[in-house]
Image: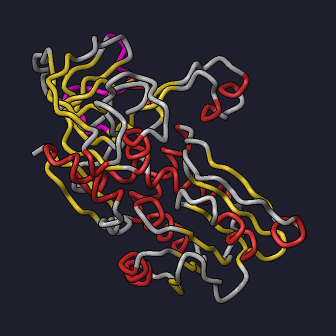
Amino acid sequence: MSTPARPAPATTTAWIVDHNAPAAEHPLRLVERPLAAIDAHDLLVEIAACGVCRTDLHLAEGDLAPHLPHCTPGHEIVGRVLQVGGEPGDFEPGDRVGAAWLAGTCGECRYCRAGQENLCPRSSYTGWDRHGGYARHAVVDARFAYHLPEGPPAEELAPLLCAGIIGFRALQRAQLPPGGRLGIYGFGASAHLTAQLARSRGATVHVLTRAEGARRLALDLGAATARGAYDTPPEPLDAAILFAPVGDLVPVALAALDRGGTLAVAGIHLTAIPTLDYQQHLFQERTLRSVTANTRADGLAYLAEATHGRPVVHVRPYPMDEAPAALADLAADRITGVAVLMAA
């Protein structure tokens, strides 16, 4: 959808992390912030929707050290290209575009050259190193942006850009065999998309999470069982993914694995892990793995699969000016599915 470029605004209305505090104490502040200059590879995007991710909560509450002072959070951005830089690639004004967590890499280090750009020491991230999507506009690197289809509503596409992509990578890291038994610990934004992806590939999914509403949603989406977070699944697991940022669940999930099973921890922040017992938790070739961000290849592969399969995205929309309420509701486990900020 190509349209003539419009004049770029000099500023944008945006939420910033004013100070670190619990979400209920409103660490965000609404400001009129100057827009960054558009470099050769950049796009100026007019935002339609931005998903609310637990990483945003970690940044606001201080679990993650700030990289950019008074940063605008948000890395599940859906919008339209307003202007392009000097080398826009295949984007034009009017194109529907998505921006995700990975915002840039060096392209030169051994990790980038080996296809492991998620491990690049000079990687940068939307809503942490660059201002993100809790705003009317954002400047994003076209090389790390995604073309999005015209059909689906913006609020259904936004969660795919982090919750979906990270879940996709976590499922890869968990090494679930075809038709295997997958345990999912925690059932928020990413988990409810990952469960559907695993089921579409023939897996049996067991969900273990503390919230009753999340357990009901899991069953509605086709999980075989849904139990409490510390409960034992009804059968040994071939693989498990820990989405809840709770280190106490690591030994619980490891103990639930069958011989040769793998636990993937999908999160940028995790509370302390208790001491593991080798015989109970790791012996018989059980594996514990972390998940670090994603590659652009992950994003392209997941979005292609999700566009074909159209997962059910359980959305709770909020107006953009209610971003503090959305974060507070996320912190208090009052959201089943995923919160999305809407620009209009």
Is 152 located above or below residue 20 in the figure?
Answer: below
Identify which residue is drawn at 72% across, 77% down.
256
Image quadrant holding the N terminus, namely top left
**Magenta region includes residue 92:** yes
Apparent side of residue 302 relative to residue 233 in the rendered image (left or right): left
Whole-percent x and y of residue 274?
Answer: 72, 60
Apparent side of residue 190 relative to residue 234 in the rendered image (left or right): left
Identify which residue is drawn at 62% across, 58% down.
247
Identify which residue is drawn at 35% across, 47% down.
22
Q: Let me know if residue 273 appears in the view.
A: yes
Apparent side of residue 326 relative to residue 309 in the rendered image (left or right): left
Q: Which quarter of the picture shows residue 128?
A: top left
Whole-percent x and y of residue 46?
Answer: 19, 32
Identify which residue is drawn at 43% across, 84% down.
219
Q: Main secondary structure of the magenta part?
A: loop
**Magenta region includes residue 32:** no
What's drawn in magenta, residue-wise? 86-97
Whole-percent x and y of residue 210?
Answer: 47, 75
